[in-house]
Amino acid sequence: MSSKLFTMLKLQIDENRRTTLLLSNILQAVTRLEGELGEAYESEDLAQDGARQGLPTREIPLSEKDVQIVHLIQLAPDGMACADDIRQRMSYRGRNAASARLSRLCKLGVLIRYQLGHKVYYNYDAGKTTNTLIVTPPQ
């Protein structure tokens, strides 16, 4: 009878060790996640403080051609342009290059896309990019 008792105690001790090890790993993971979340909240607070002070909270790297496209849209009579307008003003052979650049600028959040009939027009909204710094390479 004592050997059965000894075997049961040994199994219980082994199970206790495994449980303790598992709980220790969980505690380490939770501690690591708390640290990462704390850093994320701190960086978010710094971004909000920068926005309150009028500093840009994000940077968007743009090529020289992309900056020219944004300027063309800003200077357009109605403040909007389609791929055909950009193709013509930038002397592209086809509409695909202009369309791809406009689509990329829209995904970056620099331009706003409007579907008017069969054509897609893009508009630059300065209010949308108030806290954005557009970075271009040196010329």
Image: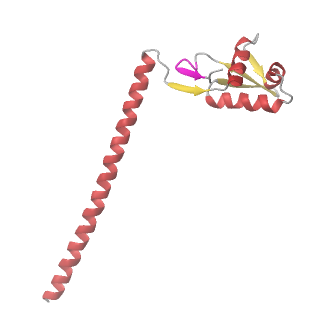
Task: Using residue 41 as the reference point, say whether residue 23 is left or right of it.
Answer: left
- The x and y percentages for residue 132 are 54, 21
**Quarter the C terminus occupies:** top right
Number of numbered discs present? 0
Q: Residue furthest bottom?
A: 1
Q: Which residues are magenta?
A: 128-135
- The x and y percentages for residue 61 are 60, 27
Task: Using residue 56 as the reference point, say whether residue 138 is left or right of it.
Answer: right
Give the colouring mode of the picture.
Answer: secondary structure
Q: Residue furthest right?
A: 93
* Magenta-drawn stretch contains 52: no
Q: Residue furthest front?
A: 139
Asked which quadrant contains residue 129, the reply is top right
* Magenta-drawn stretch contains 132: yes
Task: Using residue 29 as the reference point, say whether residue 20 is left or right of it.
Answer: left
Asked which quadrant contains residue 62, the reply is top right
Could you tell me which residue is drawn at 38 percent across and 33 percent down?
A: 41
Could you tell me which residue is drawn at 18 percent across and 86 percent down?
A: 4
Could you tell me which residue is drawn at 79 percent across and 25 percent down?
A: 83
Asked which quadrant contains residue 14, the reply is bottom left
- The x and y percentages for residue 72 are 74, 16
Front-most of 25 and 60? 60
Front-most of 132 and 9? 132
- The x and y percentages for residue 24 are 27, 58
Above or below, 78 against 17 in this view is above
**Quarter the N terminus occupies:** bottom left
Front-most of 38 and 88? 88
